Amino acid sequence: MSKIARIPPPDLVLAIDLGGSKTKAIAVAYASGAKPVLLCMEPEVADVSYASLQDYEQNKSGTSEPEDTCWIGVGDDYHAVGFLAQHKYGGNSLLKQLKEASAIPKICGALWVLREKLGLDNKLKVALTVLLPPSEYQDKESLLVKLTSALECFRTPTGEMRVKLLLFDAKSEGAGMYLHRRAVLGDDINNRALAIAMVGYRNASVLMSVRGTVSPGLTSEFGMAWMVDAFVRRTSGLHKEDPRLIPAIVEAGASCLHEPLTRLVRKKNPLEIEAEAIRMAEALKLSRDDYFRALVRWLSQQIPVDIDEIIFCGGTAEYLKEELVAHWSHTYVIWNGGIEIPPQLDTAGMGSRIGDVLALYKAFITRINLLQNRKQTSNADESTSNKSFPVDQQHKLLVGAVHSKERKKPKGFLDMPEKL
């Protein structure tokens, strides 16, 4: 029987979704027995000079939450993250770049914010799991190498942080939903073909599970950003990075009501505001219809007609729910995998948008609990229970290998935990 790879108890357990509209993270101060917390940050990142950050720190006034004043420095590179990047430095959400490009500052930034909010030490042992688009899943080891190096020592508004990764696991977007559904179905998942369609702001992706085997996922550019681009091109005076844009579009709903769009109009005459908002609504109708057709055209190529069930998830899927329900009316559809979002956790009102990362967190924390319980009940390994792993021995553990003898899987297939 293969040995279990054991880890010391982490100070912090973190599951993070580096979304295009929000960075969403669920974390728990593991040793304290506290309840998990939700952290949401704006997706913007901006490269800045250290001199500029020093000037900002010396001249800022008032009190702000750490997520609104976040910046980090790795080596000679400094980045403002989240609201600070958006509000002060003209940062953008880097939708055209790989998520890996912005993952380091976002993860480091989230760790600093959580350290501040949870009252943790500046030296942490962390277990981390992250969601990546299926098209970037193969980059997980590259991300691990860069992240491990960055976390050794990075600068923050309150001094240096040193983070040791005890466990790292990357999963494709939608994997949290799959893990939750597998837990619900049990062995019956081996008799089904199901698709997980994750439609977010940045992109749309599909994972397939056929008789229990999860195939490599597919990613497209058909996130909500595709529709927003089309809408902005059809109107005047709007820009895609305007933080008021998405809330107004969502509030306009499937009918593309013009009233919520009035707050986007720059004119001052009430009659002109009304007329411009009506023109915007017409542009939004065209853009929404074009987008839905493009999205369904792509999804239909990836999802077989004889699929047993489709799980739709992501904020943009919710936005298009009316059309998606009508199009797949003859297919068994499960919204957000049937996951319930605890109101006490959802302090930011994110609703189903945190479903995937919440499900991933639950699977990850269960895995860590199993490792801790096994460690506590094993006499054979008591002598090593308080030792941390050397860096050269960590690598296999960090990429998610629970057993010392790894089972070979087809390249690109998801590494799922043995038990939930």
Image: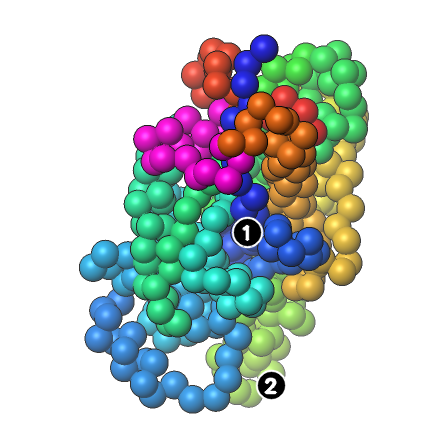
Nearer the N terminus, badge 2 or badge 1? Answer: 1
- Where residue 79 sits in the image (x, y, percent)? 32, 62
Q: Is residue 379 visible?
A: yes
- Where residue 209 sits in the image (x, y, percent)? 63, 20
Give left or right: position of 161 versus 309. left
Q: Who's the residue at 65% across and 70% down the image?
A: 260
Residue 94, relative to residue 56: is it above or below?
above
Q: Who's the residue at 32% across and 31% down the image?
A: 392
Mark carried by residue 12: 1
Secondary structure of the residue carrying tag 1 is strand
Report the amino acid beneath label 1. Answer: Leu
Please state the extent of the stretch shown in magenta in the rendering: 384-401
Q: Which residue is mark 2?
A: 270
Q: Quadrant of residue 142?
A: top left
Secondary structure of the residue carrying tag 2 is helix
How crowded is the residue under tag 1: few (<14 C-alpha within 10 Å), some, or many (20+)?
many
Q: Is residue 159 magenta?
A: no
Q: Is residue 387 magenta?
A: yes
Instruction: Name the foreground residue: 275 vs 7.
Output: 7
Disc 2 and disc 1: Cα gap in Å? 53 Å
